[in-house]
Image (cartoon, rainbow, N blue to C red):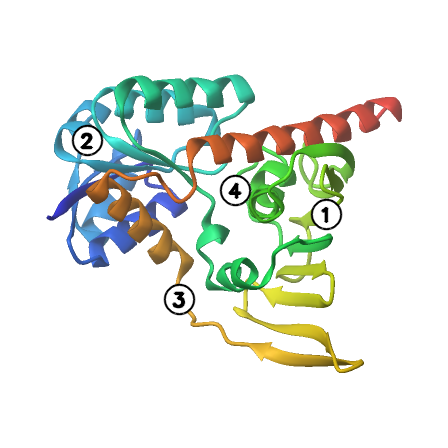
Amino acid sequence: MEISAGVAGAGSMGRNHARVYGLMDGVRLEGIFDVDRGRAEAVAAEFGGEVMDSLEALAERCEAVSVAVPTEHHLDVGGKLMRLGAHVLVEKPIAANETEAEELLRIAGTTGRLLQVGHIERFNPVLRQLEDRLDRPRFIEAHRLSPFPNRSLDIGVVLDLMIHDLEVILHLVNSPVTNIDAVGVPVLTRYEDIANARVRFENGCVANITASRISPERMRKIRVFQENCYLSLDYQEQNGKIFWTEAGGIQNAEVEVDPSEPLVAELGAFIETVRGQKEPAVTGQQGAAALEVALEITRLIQAESDSRGV
């Protein structure tokens, strides 16, 4: 069964979604919508699909729609599309705040439409290595660094970058958060551009997470420790190493990763979810949980900044 797909928001992320939909078997890129019609026309000219004049027209023609508009519009755009009958993949973070996230969940429930959240690292092939090899992580360290992006300047680095690792860690640990310590500093914007958080879980696991969007280099790495095992993975290079104790010594081996583009896997999972009407790989509830932790970190950073009179 061919699925008709569309994209709301023709910026850099929406352009990538359109590119992938245009390449997928069993999918027809049907429509592109953006409040800036010129941007929509440029994406449609490059990858196909018809420029739509409204969200109503987009939902009428498309079963599945990626929402790649600014975060502050996720509720308005995603909610409207679901009310109009479309299944929705909304880019991360799911919404601007907890209240809006809950409203998106409510709309999905009342309309019976699918709501997937675009936490792309869940589809990175290195994550499968973590899922396959870990049963009780005790300590996790994640670093996500990038040069200044000149985008997503309406949010800080926690909601821009750190939230990727927060969602993955919540998924891996699968235990309630009991305590958070956080620091962050605004450098080039009015929001935090570099941040560190230490998150403790009810089961005893501790995660130390660093994110920066003012680094001269790019880095996306995660290290996970559990009893008798340590796994170090590079999301960016899609490789890693595993260390374990055996016969009184420490053994190690390269982790074999089948390289693939995470966005292709993410949109493929979304389309298969729409086709089979099953639960999304990253549910709205999971996206809302990651947002809740990320917002608590930003509040702690702001409180610490206020105490210093910054």
Q: In the drawing, what numbered circle is on residue 58?
A: 2
Q: Are marks 3 and 2 in contact (CB under 8 Å)?
A: no
Q: Tag 2's secondary structure?
A: helix
Q: As rendered, which of 60 and 271 lies closer to the eye?
A: 271
**N-term-proximal mark, 3 vs 2:** 2
| Front residue of 53 and 87 | 87
The residue at the point 33 percent across, 36 percent down is: 9
Quarter occupied by the C terminus: top right
Which-is-in-front pick, marks 3 and 4?
A: 3
What SS does tag 3 mark?
loop
Q: Tell which circle, 3 or 4, labels the residue nearer the N-terminal end.
A: 4
Determine the residue located farthest toward the front in the rendered image: 247
Q: Residue furthest left?
A: 1
Taking the spot 39% from the left edge, 18% from the top edge, the residue there is 106
Mark number for residue 22? none
Q: Residue at x 43, y 70 (%)?
A: 259
> Which residue is at the front of the view, 46 or 294?
294
Q: Is residue 228 visible?
A: yes
Question: Are the two marked residues, 3 and 1, in contact with CB atoms closer than 8 angstroms?
Answer: no
Q: Nearer the viewer, mark 4 or mark 1?
A: 1
Q: Is residue 235 left or right of residue 66?
A: right
User: How far apart in space, not on screen, are marks 2 and 1 (Cα)?
Assistant: 41 Å
Q: CA distance from mark 4 to mark 1?
A: 27 Å
Image point 77% across, 38% down: which residue?
185
Look at mark 4 in the image and give the residue it sits on: 151
For marks 3 and 1 on the same chain, the one whose residue lies earlier in the sequence: 1
Residue 203, percent from left and from top: 71, 41
Q: Nearer the viewer, mark 2 or mark 1?
A: 1
Q: Please, what secondary structure does the residue beneath circle 4 have?
A: loop
Determine which of the numbered discs, if any, sits on residue 260 in the image: 3
Label 4 crowding class (10 Å Cα cut-off): few <14, some 14-19, many 20+? few
